[in-house]
Amino acid sequence: MGDAVTVTGPTERLPREDDATVELSRVRADKPERYRSGFWREFSGSLAVGLAVLALIVVGLQISGWVRGVPGPGVGVMVVHLVLAVIALLVQRFADIKRGPESTLAVLLVCVVTGIVIWFLWWA
């Protein structure tokens, strides 16, 4: 029972007298500019997601119509919903990546696409 215990790990290398401590210079790191997406970009994102959900609902209604033997919304309406929802999502992705006038134009385009869907496929 008189055996010595060998300790390994972080305590194995204790500071020695010949280890020089080097003090690093303190450089004040400028805080990066906080990026805010803004109300309009978030609003257009919700419109794009809303169009995608609406397109899925229309697809579900069309499939339900086929299964039950009723007309449903129609294949054309379904395809237009899907195409415009994909366009809105892609344009919104572009708006999320870019900044400045390009992003603003993309946000406006998402709003226009949403307006087209609502006006021509639901109200008219």
Image (spheres, rainbow, N blue to C red):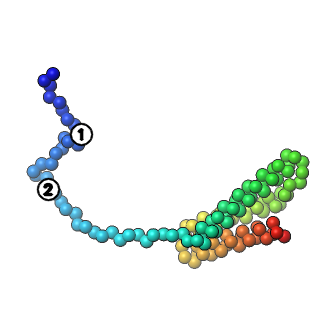
Relative to 52, is 119 above or below? Answer: below
Is the residue marked by circle 2 packed among few (<14), some (14-19), or many (20+) residues within 10 Å?
few
* Residue under label 1: 9
Q: Residue furthest bottom?
A: 101
Amino acid type at circle 2 is: Ala
Relative to 64, is 97 above or below? Answer: below
Identify the secondary structure beneath mark 1: loop
Residue 96 visible in the current orientation: yes
Identify which residue is drawn at 71% across, 73% down.
Answer: 112
Q: Residue furthest front?
A: 39
Query: Could you say where residue 61 lies in the image, as x and y percent from the top left?
Result: 81, 53
Q: Residue furthest top?
A: 1
Identify which residue is drawn at 74% across, 58% down.
Answer: 55
Residue 37 lies in quadrant: bottom right
* Residue under label 2: 20
Identify which residue is drawn at 43% across, 71% down.
Answer: 33
Total labels: the figure holds 2
Query: Could you say where residue 1 lies in the image, as x and y percent from the top left?
Result: 15, 22
Amino acid type at circle 1 is: Gly
